[in-house]
Amino acid sequence: MTQSAFDRLAPTYDADFTATPIAAYLRRVAHERLAQLVQPGARVLELGCGTGEDARAVAQMGAHVTATDASAAMLAIAAEKTRGLNVRVAHLDLNAPQASNIGDTFDGVYSNFGALNCAEDRAALAAWLARHVRAGGWAAFAVMGPFCLWEMLWHGAHGQFRTATRRWQPSQFQIDDSPPVTVTCPTPRQLAREFAPHFERSSVRPFGLFVPHTAAYAVVEKRSWLLRPLLALDTITRERSSFAPLGDHYWITFRRRDE
Ligand SMILES: C[S@@+](CC[C@H](N)C(=O)[O-])C[C@H]1O[C@@H](n2cnc3c(N)ncnc32)[C@H](O)[C@@H]1O
């Protein structure tokens, strides 16, 4: 069977990404934000869980987590990482969620680091989620926006204008001959519109504004004189909603409407 691009990334995902200082910093921010939403004993759904870093943290907050992804290789690592915790690992394709056997109703749903950018019809996904999140429940997503300042300045300065503007239209993510994954980067306003029939936007904040986009992690991380002030600036500005669209991702939360 042909492996997906994410199956191919899975074996080294934690070493290449999770363990880097910038990803670890952002993960701490995500966990602080999730801790404000997750009640002990809550039933929580994760979309695009990858290797299960967040599922482990949310389970340790006392929740019952259903951690889902379309990549079998990612799910296998997530299952191993969360063994012994209150985590159920399950296959769910964001482009065909109705084919999954997730029958429960959840108190909340979350997704970190751009998994939602791989959903081709987010309005349909929101409608599906509305059937699985209780009225008054919450949703929290870290989504790649179209205007990442770091990416535009970095690649623009290197004369890579196609890369600098790649988020402005749908793009294909592929590794070698893997089936392409279509990636789209909605603004917070667009995403809120797609979710609006069922979910009311509660907040939006930057998620990685002064820290660089992934392609420049290594360059910055090697220079602690640069990394330290950038992390400090990010910490100071990370609650400023007006800056949210300019980050590598933004963190957006919703409340499930009473229907
Ligand atoms: C950048 S990774 C983020 C993983 C994880 N959320 C994290 O915080 O590290 C994106 C994840 O989205 C998953 N994904 C991509 N397309 C998907 C789809 N159509 N349905 C479900 N998951 C998908 C990938 O398999 C991958 O695990």
Image (tube, rainbow, N blue to C red):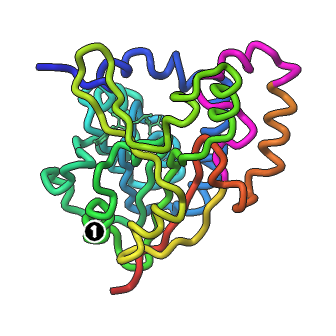
Q: Quadrant of ligand 1?
A: top left
Q: With 211 as the anchor, is 138 left or right in this view?
A: left
Q: Quadrant of residue 55?
A: top left
Q: With 229 as the anchor, is 161 left or right in this view?
A: left
Using the image as rendered, state which of residue 185 and residue 134 is in the foreground: 185
Q: With 234 as the anchor, is 42 left or right in this view?
A: left
Q: With 65 as the anchor, is 53 left or right in this view?
A: right
| Span highlighted in magenta in the image | 206-226
Quarter of the figure with the C terminus: bottom left
Percent x, y of residue 70: 26, 37
Q: Residue at the spot x=41%, y=58% of the render?
A: 109
Q: Quadrant of residue 127?
A: bottom left
Q: Amino acid at mark 1?
A: Ala
Number of numbered discs overlaid on the protein picture: 1
The local secondary structure at tag 1 comes to: helix
Percent x, y of residue 23: 61, 31
Percent x, y of residue 100: 16, 50
Q: Is residue 209 magenta?
A: yes
Give the answer, above or below, for where 205 lies relative to 29: below
Q: What residue is shown with label 1?
A: 127
**Residue 233 visible in the snapshot:** yes
Q: Residue at the spot x=23%, y=45% of the render?
A: 92
Percent x, y of residue 144: 52, 45
Using the image as rendered, state which of residue 54 and residue 247 is in the foreground: 247
